[in-house]
């Protein structure tokens, strides 16, 4: 538990040990609704959702979309996701080089989340620009660009919602709009918040489960071989990829909701608290030989999807996409390797999302 300066010049607490991380993530004295700390003007359209809410709002907002992401429903998408993976690889068949992120790891989850939401897949480049910009992962864009991208994204969503109001389908956005129109269960602002969160989460995370996971395999040829010989090990392998090289490096912000004491540290109301998930997942007090990448590791209870009430809603979907993406890639490209002239892998900038720009 260390007090330190965060980007933006704010002091806050960084939690790096597994046990402390679990405690913070389930302790409701640490809150997520920034309005309670900074006042009503502090929220943007993109934070009007469950990830930035405390109970009871949190339960209501999560409840509205939860039924679309249950393990049973997601498992029902297996054949379709398999088809998407095969179609993407058909397109590169016969080429001697593949750029794993752009050709495969990025489009696969985007196609899936676009279909669930009912937004046009042809707009995926716009979504990518906007979500990269909002998550702050792209260095090349300055503050003005971020502001402009937020406006464009909001405008796009507003136009789309209008279209759906007139012609609803059986997608998730249509269901949210019907829920808004039929009662008090969520406001229009909350629809913006929830939909943009799903688009951003769908764009920024699973791509790096696939990317970081394949890197881990390529860097550990014995584990790669093991998985190629026993593809049925994939479920455990995905959990180890999440633990060893997790796609979300730090939790989103929490704040001490009151003056409090946590493990001997006095924290003031409003203090920023961030959990270093990837660090906790390499804590030797929790994991034997934590820096070893072992796809047969016994049930590892990692924190890659967080913990407590904000634990990732998309985890069943991300796991299934990861399983299918990695096993299909290994089956169809058994001699896969990094290109000799690839050079050092370049990690994307930014604090929350952890992934590489390209895997040649
Ligand atoms: C929350 C990780 C994929 C939707 C979270 C949190 C983490 C996380 C760590 C909690 C953040 C915190 O407590 O501060 C991941 C990883 C993914 C992934 C590692 C891929 C491997 C997805 C996908 C979706 C999604 C595909 C949606 C389609 C959400 C939502 C929340 C969330 C809605 C907020 C839940 C709440 O506040 O109750 N995710 N995520 N995630 N994730 Fe994911």
Image (tube, grey):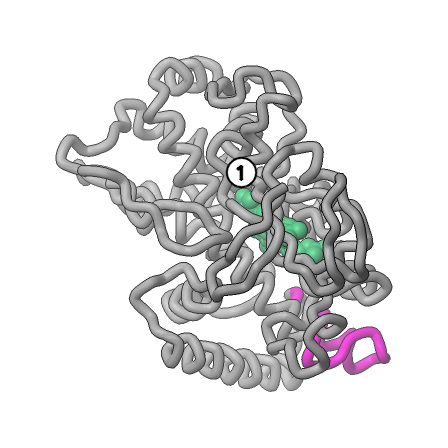
Residue behind mark 1: 278
Is 20 located above or below residue 194 in the figure?
above
Q: Quadrant of residue 50?
A: bottom right
Identify the magenta region: 172-190
Q: Is any part of residue 31 visible from this angle? A: yes
13 or 85: nearer the viewer: 13
Give left or right: position of 215 versus 269: left
Q: Main secondary structure of the magenta part?
A: helix
Residue 195 located within the stretch drawn in magenta = no
Identify the residue shown where x is 61% and y is 81%.
161
In the depicted structure, whether residue 259 falls above or below residue 328: below
Say which element carries label 1.
Answer: helix
Q: Residue furthest left?
A: 341
Q: Is residue 118 above or below residue 163?
A: above
Q: Give the residue at x 51% y 84%.
A: 155
Q: How would you rate the neighbour count of disc 1 (Cα within 10 Å): few for under 14, some for 14-19, many for 20 or more? A: many
The one of 25 and 11 positioned closer to us in this rendering: 11
Q: Is residue 164 left or right of residue 200?
A: right
């Amino acid at each position: 538990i260390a007090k330190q300066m965060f980007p933006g010049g704010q002091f806050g607490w960084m939690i790096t040990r597994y046990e402390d991380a679990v405690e913070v993530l389930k302790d409701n004295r640490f809150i997520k609704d920034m309005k309670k700390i900074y006042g009503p003007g502090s929220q943007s359209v993109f934070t009007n959702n469950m990830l930035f809410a405390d109970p009871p709002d949190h339960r209501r907002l999560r409840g509205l979309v939860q039924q679309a992401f249950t393990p049973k429903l997601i498992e029902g998408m297996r054949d379709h996701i398999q088809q998407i993976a095969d179609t993407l690889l058909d397109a590169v068949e016969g080429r001697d080089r593949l750029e794993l992120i752009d050709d495969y790891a990025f489009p696969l989850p985007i196609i899936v989340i676009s279909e669930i939401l009912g937004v046009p897949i042809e707009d995926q480049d716009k979504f990518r620009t906007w979500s990269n910009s909002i998550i702050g992962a792209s260095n090349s864009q300055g503050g003005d660009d971020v502001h402009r991208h937020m406006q464009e994204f909001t405008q796009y969503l507003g136009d789309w919602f209008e279209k759906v109001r007139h012609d609803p389908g059986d997608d998730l956005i249509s269901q949210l709009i019907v829920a808004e129109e039929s009662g008090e269960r969520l406001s229009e602002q909350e629809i913006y918040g929830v939909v943009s969160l799903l688009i951003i989460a769908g764009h920024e995370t699973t791509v790096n489960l696939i990317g970081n996971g394949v890197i881990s395999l390529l860097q550990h040829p014995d584990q790669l071989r093991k998985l190629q010989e026993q593809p049925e090990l994939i479920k455990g392998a995905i959990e180890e990829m999440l633990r060893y090289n997790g796609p979300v490096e730090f939790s989103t912000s929490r704040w001490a909701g009151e003056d409090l004491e946590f493990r001997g540290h006095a924290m003031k109301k409003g203090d920023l608290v961030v959990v270093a998930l990837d660090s906790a997942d390499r804590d030797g007090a929790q994991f034997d030989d934590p820096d070893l990448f072992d796809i047969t590791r016994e049930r590892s209870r990692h924190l890659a999807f967080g913990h407590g009430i904000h634990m990732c809603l998309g985890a069943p979907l991300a796991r299934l996409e990861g399983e299918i993406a990695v096993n299909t890639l290994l089956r169809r490209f058994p001699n896969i390797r990094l290109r000799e002239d690839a050079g050092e892998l370049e990690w994307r900038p930014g604090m929350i999302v952890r992934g590489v720009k390209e895997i040649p």
